[in-house]
Image (spheres, rainbow, N blue to C red):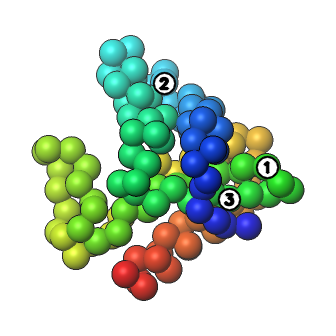
Amino acid sequence: MIRTAREEEIDAVSALLAGAYAEYEPVFPSSDFWAFYRASVVDVAGRWGESQVWVAELDGALAGSLDYFPPGGSEYHDFVSFPSSWASFRFLGIDPGRRGSGAGRALVEHAIALARRD
């Protein structure tokens, strides 16, 4: 099931993202850069209300999440910007134990449908 995250799930979504992105730590050029990137990824509370946080739920448990930014809300960083008519998504993460379940595909297809609607 794809649904919006609940505010009381912010910590659970943050933990899910930490686990989903952990495998990338060894390929970062420095531990400082990794710490900066990881902090951005897991800061669900910091972007709550700026993005729409969607989750994939399987068997009653969170399997993945994705942040959807509607058109006009796609600011990324000061040095990266998108046209105001574009929607975007970031922070796609799937629990490593749930990879291959279709949760990631379902979240991306949902984001595409939202973008088409918007």
Which of disc 2 and disc 1 is earlier in sequence?
Answer: 2
Which mark, residue 56? 3
Residue 20 visible here: no
Q: Residues within 10 Å of mark 2 (few under 14, many from 20)?
A: some
Q: Are marks 1 and 2 in contact (CB under 8 Å)?
A: no
The kind of secondary structure element at disc 1 is strand
Judged left or right of residue 58, residue 28 is left
Q: Residues within 10 Å of mark 1 (few under 14, many from 20)?
A: few
Q: Amino acid at mark 3?
A: Ala
Would you name the residue on which mark 1 appears?
61
Judged left or right of residue 93, residue 32 is left
Residue drawn at x 70%, y 40% is 96
Which of disc 1 and disc 3 is earlier in sequence?
Answer: 3
Quadrant where the image shows the N terminus: bottom right
Q: Amino acid at mark 2?
A: Glu
Report the mark closest to the observer, 2 or 3: 3
Residue drawn at x 38%, y 14% is 31
Residue 38 visible here: yes
The kind of secondary structure element at disc 3 is strand
Q: Percent position (x, y) of residue 95?
A: 69, 43
Q: Percent position (x, y) of residue 43?
A: 44, 36
Would you name the residue on which mark 2 appears?
25
